[in-house]
Image: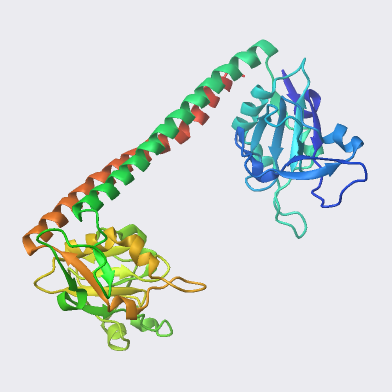
Amino acid sequence: MRTTLGEICEIQLGKMLSPKAHAGGKRGPYLRNQNVQWGRFKLDDIAEMDFDERERCKFLLKPGDLLVCEGGEPGRAAIWEGQIQECFYQKALHRLRPKADKATADFLLYRLWLGGIRKEFTGSQGQTTIAHLPAERLSVIPVELPDLATQRRLATRLKSQMAAVEETRRRVQEQAREALALLDKTIAESFHGITPLSVGRDESTAPAGWRWKGLLELARLESGHTPSRRFPEYWAEGDIPWLALPDIRALDCRTATQTSEKTNALGIANSSARVLPAGTVALSRTASVGFVTRFGCEMATSQDFVNWVCGPELNSGYLMWLLRASRSFVRSLSTGAVHQTVYTDAVKQFRVCLPDLKEQQRIANHLDETFRLNQQLQKALSTQLEALDKLPGAFLREAFGSL
C-alpha cells in the first residue's frame, strides 16, 4: 500500500529551548538534537526544562515514538523506548507516533533510513543555512507500506542484522585499539621501559650497557624555514621536497620521500631554509607536537620542525624511535596559549639514552618491522570497517526490494 507519513503517524514538532520557568511547572529531562544518533540515543548530557501541564501532555515522549532530527546531520532517527521514565524533546526534533493499526516504529525507522529522508531537508531558506523540514512536508512524504505482520517480520530481521553489524564493528575497532596498544608496548620494551629522552639531566637510570649523552654531541641541530610566498618563482617547478605540518601525520614514524609541496634552489638561496641529507630526523615542535619522521632523500623543512643530522655514533632510525618512545615527554615540554610549541632552548638541552651502535641498529630494524606489520593490520581492519559500513544499506535494499 502506498501512503504518506501523515496518514500513518501523528507528527509533532518539539518545544523551543527556553530558560524561563513556568509558575507551577514541572522540570523534566529534555532531549536535544545532539542526543539523537542513527538508531540510538546519546544520553550522557541530557538537559532539563520546565513544562506546564498543557505542554507536558503535548511534548511528553512515549515508548515507540520515532524522533527525526532537523539539525546536525538532518534525518537522523531513533526510537524512544522509555530510556528515561519521563522525557520531553526539542523543537529541532520531529516526533512521529505511528498509529497502532497502520505502522510500527521499527519498520518506519528502517524505511526512512533506506529512503534517504535527508534529501527532503532544505538548507538555504532566506538567510539561514540551517537544514529543516516543515511538518507539513514531512507529513506528505510517501511510504510503501505492507501489512503489519510483514512490517514486524522485516523489522525483526533488520534489527538482528543491524545489531550483528554493530557488534562486529565494535570487535574490529577493539582489535585496532589493541594493535596500537601492542605497538606502544613493543616500543616501550625496546627502551627497557624508560623514557630515553631528558632535558638537562638524566631522568632515569640507564639500562646495563647504555649511557646518557647530550644529543648535540651526537647530531647537528638544524632548523627549518619557509621561502617567501610573495615570490611564486621560489616554488615554481620545485624539485626540492619541503616538509611542512600538513605532511607530518601521514609520515609519522615513516621514511619521508615525498611532500605535498616542493621549493627550488632559488627559494633555498633566498631563505634560511637548508637542504638536509637523507637520514635526517625531523621532529614537529609546534601544533602536531611530537610527530617524527626520517628523510629518505634530501629535503628542507618549515620552521615547525627541529632536525638532527646524525653523526657516526647515532643511528638515525634509532633516534626516530627514541623520539617516538618519548612523545608524551616531548609534549610535556610544549607551551603556548594558542599553539603549543617546544622552544629551541629546551631542544638544545636534549639528552638521549643509547646503547652501542650495533644495538641501536637492531632496535631500529625491529621497530621498523613491527610498525610495518602493524600498519598492514590497521589497513586490513580499516578495509573491514569500510565493508561493514556498506552492509546496512545492503540489508535494507534486500528487505525492501520487493515493496
Q: Is residue 140 left or right of residue 310?
A: right
Q: Up-down: is 212 above or below 254? A: below
Q: Quadrant of residue 172?
A: top left
What residue occupies the far top of the structure in this picture? 149
Does residue 257 show up?
no
- Where, quadrant-wise, is the C terminus in this rendering? top right
Q: Up-down: is 250 above or below 39? A: below
Q: Up-down: is 251 above or below 55? A: below
- Using the image as rendered, state which of residue 281 and residue 110 is in the foreground: 281
Does residue 309 show up?
yes
Q: Which residue is drawn at 44% across and 73% down?
A: 335
The picture places residue 19, in percent across and down from the top left corner, at: 82, 52
Q: Is residue 83 left or right of residue 13?
A: left
What residue occupies the far front of the structure in this picture? 205
The picture places residue 132, in percent across and down from the top left corner, at: 73, 46
The picture places residue 6, in percent across and down from the top left corner, at: 80, 29
Q: Quadrant of residue 278?
A: bottom left
Q: Residue at x 65, y 22 (%)?
A: 107
- Where, quadrant-wise, is the N terminus in this rendering? top right
Q: Residue at x 72, y 25 (%)?
A: 63
Q: Up-down: is 396 above or below 364? A: above
Q: Residue at x 27, y 69 (%)?
A: 198
